[in-house]
Image: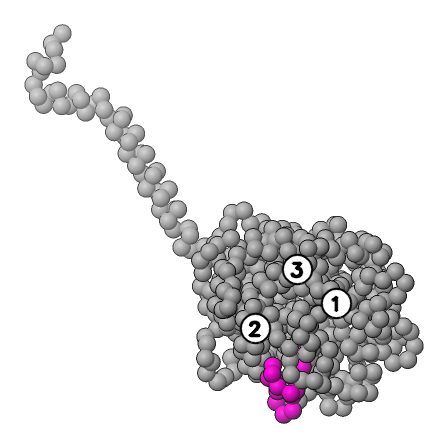
Amino acid sequence: MQSQKSLPLSTRIQSSLARSRFLTFSVLIHVIIVVMAGSVVLFRPANEPQFPMINVGPPIDQDPIPPQTEQPMTPSDSPHVLDPKITPPSIKSIQTASTDTSFQMPVSASLPQISLRSETGSNASSIKLAHGAGSNIPASMSGRFGGTMREAQMRNKQKESSERAVLAGLNWLKEHQNSDGSWSNEFKPGMTGLATLCFLGHGELQNSVEYGPTVQAAIKWLLARGGEFDGKMSLTKDGWGGNAGVYEHAICTYALGEYFSLTQDDAAKDTLAKAIKYIVDGQNEDGGWKYAYAKGGVSDTSVTGWQVQALKAAHLTALGLPGVDEALDKCMLYLKSAQCADGGFGYHGQAEERYGLGGVGTLCTYFWKQNKDKLVRDGIKYIIDRTKNAEPVVYKGSKADLYGWYYNTQACLMFGNATWDQWNRWFQEEISSAQANDGSWPPMANAGVGGLQTKADGAGPYYRTTLCVLMLEVYYRNLPANKS
């Protein structure tokens, strides 16, 4: 056989190519596969949205408004990672339900895909929520999480400074929590319920990086005390702890209702059901509620407001707790009877009309009926006219009323459009700029409102701070949603 070396060069080259044709073909196929796979990887992130978006309600009319000193948040502003610039002392960079440290909200493969449901429980959409969230939450609460939170902030015109104030307030509450998970030593149940609502309102659950232990301790305290007194959240064996007891019971029940809706934690179900039963059974014949859940006579509009919020939270759990919807329907009759000719509301029926109650009746009616009927329209007109002409939103002013502003803020957001634009211009910067250096809110000057609004010690700082945080969370805390 003739050796390869003795063959002509051209013949040897042809022979080598023939032997390597299969190797060459294989290499070519692999190169094509790698190129195609790389193209898919590079193409998908640029064309798929990071978060599934849901319908968060009808758009707000873009009425002309005066120039703002600070622009609303933009899509790149992450609400969870702002570093409040408050001195002294400085507030450290805060990580909340997100673990990101930049202004870009990350897409985490570990975040569960959560179904959202309408008020009646049917699936509406889905969204990636924080760790610890339940598998099925009301759509109206979806604004507390992820991309839907950012969308709500932009839609409702929240400024970056007000979100910084929220975070500073949450940090103050975290630092001033009692070792047993409660807050304050005065009106402890009420202050604990309000503080818990603040953290839940920001989407903070037990697995929140910054506030998880705070929330866990708070829920543990609420459940332990509710269990100790068979569902009486105001912590008395025989009565309701004086006039404050019915407020405190409703506020704690409100917090437990929101907690269950966000987590579906069965550990809270029994205490919540018992607490709600006291409210249902304590309803007065006229549809409202009174101190000590007494019966007869005319109800108290202020007491009624907190019972309605607790009952609406119970409705949103979709547990079908007995009597909840019926009690809310009956309450609408009392609120209608308590509205005065100018659209405001009285303290006992139409008697003793007060500015601070205008938002109570208006919000509670909208909360349940979810429409802008005459009562709501008249109530909104009263709020705007009275604020503009007689009761300005000035934190240090002689007419300041934080209690009224808490309700007015929510009512105006729910009503939307030019009403919300007007109220937002009045309240947002005023409340956020009134915050003290430590993250709390200082005593107010209006001696007429008295009580915890002006008290420097005791429950005063907790009360003012929680109401202000809840007000500044309004942009995303409860999105307008239909009852049915």
Q: Amino acid at mark 1?
A: Glu
168 or 149, which lies in front? 168
197 or 174, which lies in front? 174
Q: Amino acid at mark 2?
A: Ala
In the picture, measured across the screen, residue 335 lies left or right of residue 424, that is right
Question: Relative to 113, is 18 above or below?
Answer: above
Badge 1 marks a residue whose secondary structure is: loop
In the picture, measured across the screen, residue 282 lies left or right of residue 311, that is right
Badge 2 marks a residue whose secondary structure is: loop
Provide the residue span drawn in magenta: 388-402
Q: Residue at x 79, y 74 (%)?
A: 303
Magenta-drawn stretch, dominant element (helix, strand or loop): loop
Q: Residue at x 83, y 83 (%)?
A: 348
On the image, numbered disc 3 is attached to which residue? Answer: 177
- List x then y, in percent, for residue 359: 70, 80
On the image, numbered disc 1 is attached to which residue? Answer: 186
- Mark closest to the chain's N terminus, 2 or 1: 1
On the image, numbered disc 2 is attached to which residue? Answer: 436
Badge 3 marks a residue whose secondary structure is: loop
334 or 461, which lies in front? 461
Alpha-carbon distance for marks 3 and 2? 18 Å
